[in-house]
Image (tube, rainbow, N blue to C red):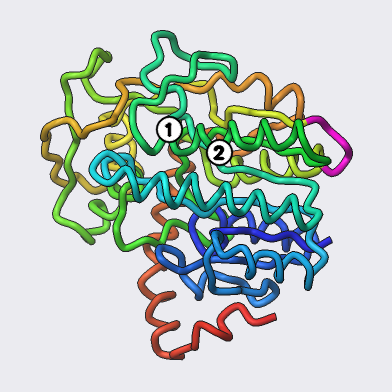
């Protein structure tokens, strides 16, 4: 079986590619490289540079490779950007996903994994939030993802097609073997930014608001190691391929940490006391989001292996230290995009 991974040159999609290859699957990556990296694609996967909204291209990929499963990770993900540029998010996250799903159904794809988000819950009145909690996203990013969930629900009712929606909480860390991690030059994830500050790659960092209704005034999030998240995807894939009904699962550890707590952990693990400045809140940020993750554990048998913030930070630090050398090697070899990740 060959699996199509959209956005497989990015952070989370790249870890999915590794997990699939580790299990002996054939993998095709479709990525426009707007935020992903050709050098992140392992040799055993095939990279096709293109747009998920290009119906002719996607149909050709499906037909030529006998694909019956798509793992969809390609999306815009920066909440403040979605607030300032909502049409871009609805175009890339919703309209293009709709076209991808249409092409998939028309060409016989049976299984679909969708990378969704805890942002669909908005500002919950009660934490933890569960899959049947009210869906009231407060920013275009969350709305753009929720719309895709609705599309999948309706399509599955009308066609021979099942799906798994995995609602991520805050994903962090890197592959424990050092093969992949967050590589975007425009960092938006808290742990990556803090790690960069600890390593001297940036002059300190900012905390966006300490006046939230939380114990220390900073936002609370549920941080999940990227490898544990991908394990949930692999279990969901097995479940769908075995004939399981479509499902929606939260992916988190059911434990919240504040921004200030995470920063203290990064300082302790790295041994560096970097500068932290407090500034105004960002638009679209809820005060607290913590996962209720009973369903993924009970239905899929998910057992996280890296449920420890110190471990998450350590893996992120290890990756950030080696990233400059990886990029430099790619630049020295001057590999053309067309053969990077060549099968």
Judged left or right of residue 30, residue 84 is left
Residue 194 makes an appearance in the image: yes
Residue 41: % across, % down: 57, 71
Pinpoint residue 78: horizontal percent, then vertical percent: 34, 45
Say whether disc 2 or disc 1 marks the residue closer to the N-terminus.
1
Determine whether the residue tagged by mark 2 lies in a helix, strand or loop.
Answer: helix
Residue that carries the numbered disc 2 in the rendered image: 148
The residue tagged 1 is 143
Residues under numbered marks 2 and 1 in contact, where contact means CB atoms less than 8 Å apart = no
Residue name at image x 39 percent, y 9 percent: 125
> Could you tell me which quadrant the N terminus lies in?
bottom right
Circle 1 Cα neighbour tier, 10 Å, few/some/many (<14 / 14–19 / ≥20): many
Residue closer to the observer: 330 or 86? 86
Q: Position of residue 37 (x, y in %)?
A: 46, 70
Kindly identify the residue that appears in the image at 34 percent across and 26 percent down.
138
Left or right of 241? Residue 8 is left
Q: Work out whether residue 179 can be spotted.
A: no
Residue 160 image point, x, y percent? 83, 41
Q: Quadrant of residue 331?
A: bottom left
- Looking at this rendering, what residue extends furthest in the right direction? 242
* Residue at the image position 78 percent from the left and 73 percent from the top: 64
Of helix, strand and loop, which one carries label 1? helix
Q: Quadrant of the C terminus?
A: bottom right
- Left or right? Give the position of 145 relative to 47: left
In the image, the segment drawn in magenta is 241-245
């Amino acid at each position: 079986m060959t699996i199509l991974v959209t956005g497989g040159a990015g952070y989370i999609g790249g870890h999915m590619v590794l997990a699939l290859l580790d299990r002996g699957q054939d993998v095709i990556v479709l990525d426009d490289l707007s935020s992903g990296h050709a050098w992140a694609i392992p040799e055993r996967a095939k990279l096709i540079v293109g747009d998920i909204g290009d119906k002719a291209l996607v149909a050709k990929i499906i037909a030529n490779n006998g694909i019956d499963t798509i793992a969809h990770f390609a999306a815009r993900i920066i909440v403040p950007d979605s607030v300032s540029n909502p049409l871009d998010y609805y175009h890339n996250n919703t309209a293009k996903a709709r076209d991808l799903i249409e092409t998939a159904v028309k060409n016989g794809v049976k299984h679909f994994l969708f990378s969704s988000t805890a942002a669909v819950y908005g500002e919950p009145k009660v934490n933890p939030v569960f899959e049947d909690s009210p869906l009231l996203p407060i920013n275009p990013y969350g709305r753009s993802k929720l719309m895709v969930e609705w599309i999948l629900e309706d399509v599955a009712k009308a066609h021979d097609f099942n799906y798994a929606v995995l609602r991520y909480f805050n994903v962090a860390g890197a592959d424990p073997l050092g093969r992949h991690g967050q590589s975007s030059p425009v960092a938006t994830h808290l742990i990556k930014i803090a790690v960069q500050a600890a390593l001297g790659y940036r002059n300190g960092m900012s905390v966006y608001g300490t006046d939230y209704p939380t114990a220390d005034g900073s936002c609370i999030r549920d941080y999940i190691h990227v490898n544990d998240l991908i394990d949930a995807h692999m279990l969901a894939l097995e479940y769908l391929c075995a004939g399981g009904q479509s499902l929606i699962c939260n992916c988190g550890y059911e434990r919240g940490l504040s921004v200030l707590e995470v920063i203290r952990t990064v300082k302790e693990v790295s041994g560096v006391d970097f500068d932290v400045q407090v500034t105004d809140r960002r638009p679209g940020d809820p005060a607290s989001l913590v996962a209720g993750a009973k369903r993924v554990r009970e239905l899929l048998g998910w057992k996280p292996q890296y449920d420890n913030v110190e471990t998450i930070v350590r893996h992120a630090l290890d990756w950030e230290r080696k990233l400059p050398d990886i990029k430099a090697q790619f630049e020295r070899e001057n590999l053309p995009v067309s053969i990077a990740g060549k099968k």
